[in-house]
Amino acid sequence: MASNAPTHHHHHERSVWSGKLAFILAGAASAVGLGNLWRFPTLAAKYGGGMFIFTYFVLAFTFGISLLLLETALGRHTKLSVIGAFSSLRKRWKFVGVLAAAVPFIITPYYCIIGGWVTKYLASYVAQGADAVAVDGFFTSFITDPVFTYVFMLIFMLLCLGVVALGVKNGIEKANFVMMPLLIVFAVGIAIFVLMQPGAAEGAAYYLIPDFSKFSPELVINALGQMFYSLSLAMGIMVTYGSYLDKKESLTQSVASIAGFDLLVSFISGLMIVPAAFLALGLAEGGTMSAGPSLMFVTLPAVFNGMGGAATFVGIVFFVLVLFAAMTSAISLIEACTSIVQDGTHWSRKKSLIVTGIVLIVAGCFINAGYNALIWIEPLGPGTQLLDFFDFLSNSVMMPIVALLTCVFVGWVIKPKVIIDEVRASAKFSLAGAWTVMIKYIAPILVVAILVWNVITQFA
Ligand code: TRP
């Protein structure tokens, strides 16, 4: 800053997006992640294909964007990250901000462990080729490795920390501008390639054609949970990102674009993953598609390996795509953590980032030890690891609680008008009435249903 510039600001300089597109891309970058690539296709395959996709679509564009709008407007209104946003409006509600802020600190370390696995797979495809990766036991022997899991987690974390260190405009925005479009191109490319394989059409039909008999409360709850995770709601991220947005940019358009982008990527990843897994797992004959790691790290490498000469190439493109998705999400998570530390301590951005980085690395090493030195800790019953526990704690328990308290806070304490006025500062908001009903009544009920469901299914 020039020495003669007036010093109106009492705190440090706050980061800002260069414009609406950068904000949308950042929201999309945090939304599009491992959740789109492995959770969405699995859920869609399990819950009647098109039926699940349709339900998800409806929920995302009613409930999902209502909450996205709430969070981003709250951030922009207060110009603070999540703890400050709550406490500046009502001191006694600061604890909700604290709870929300804790979520990215829990998610980031384990997300980066998985990011490390992705990095390792990419490296193996490049160095050894598809045969080596498809070997039985490759995955298990890697994730329990007491040295290399830490090394790859560190590589992944340092890459992401490096981008965040370059700043919001020079680091995060630029990384998103490169990675997000490439991600789409690669996903479309692999989807086309997979759909050209013999037998794939049947798999695509399985994915797309709605099976109405699968519609159930369970489907709705699962679609809701997926939506929260995918849109990065109730974790303080969108509040922080909203706080970097200029007052003149339209919030309604931005959140609709973010939700649309997220759904598009989920849909395409279903097109590439469901048909690929369809034959490999015999879904038509009642086989099941497991959620999460084994689908991505065991089933798909086996499917790729069956593709002959192209196997290594397809594997590389696929894991670059997964790496980009994981990195852009991890970058968002690290940014949220850093911003929370910075707002809480008034340290410089650099110091806040260094301290955040150290905390995250130590936490990552601890959780990763759950696969080797601490493998005897089975927090959620036999065969479960620390990573499963922190995933359950953050996504299944804390996130619905934060979402509930946020809706009560806005709907009943500060009153919806505060948010509606903020939205109207830059856009028409003709659905303000419907939005109010959503935040005051519908959302709290749905969120309590998610929480109850998550806890019951975990412990029953
Ligand atoms: N949305 C990300 C995904 O689909 C994961 C995620 C959850 C996330 N919460 C987040 C990413 C917060 C960034 C910030 O994989």
Image (cartoon, rainbow, N blue to C red):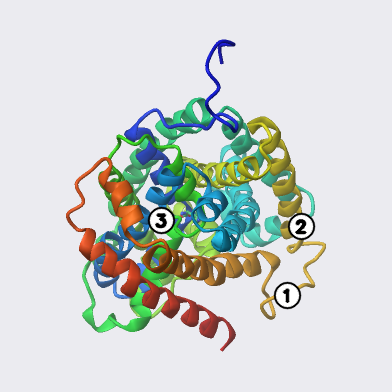
Front-lying residue, 16 or 47: 16
> Which amino acid, by three-letter code, is at mark 3?
Leu
In the depicted structure, whether residue 89 falls above or below residue 427: below
Q: Which mark is residue 231?
A: 3
* Amino acid tagged 1: Glu
Residue 109 drawn above or below residue 23: below
- Disc 1 designates what residue? 378
Q: Residues within 10 Å of mark 2 (few under 14, many from 20)?
A: some
Q: Earlier in the sequence, mark 2 or mark 3?
A: 3
Residue 323 image offset from top left, x and y in percent: 52, 43
Mark 1–mark 2 CB contact (< 8 Å): no
| Residue at mark 3: C-beta within 8 A of ligand 1 | yes
Q: Is mark 1 within 8 Å of ligand 1?
A: no
Q: Which residue is mark 2?
A: 366
- Mark 2 touches mark 3? (CB < 8 Å): no
Helix, strand or loop at mark 1? loop
| The N terminus lies in quadrant | top right
Instruction: From the viewer's perspective, tell me whether residue 380 is left or right of residue 301.
Output: right
Q: Quadrant of residue 355?
A: top right
Cβ at disc 2 under 8 Å from ligand 1: no
Task: Where is residue 299? Give x, y as percent.
Answer: 50, 62
| Mark closer to the chain start, 3 or 1 | 3
Residue 211 visible from this viewpoint: yes
Question: Which amino acid type is shown beneath numbered disc 2?
Answer: Phe
Give whichever of 315, 175 is nearer the camera.
175
Q: In the rendered image, which quarter contains the C terminus?
A: bottom right
Per the model, the C-alpha gap separating discs 2 and 3 is 27 Å
Residue 203 position, x and y percent, is: 30, 65
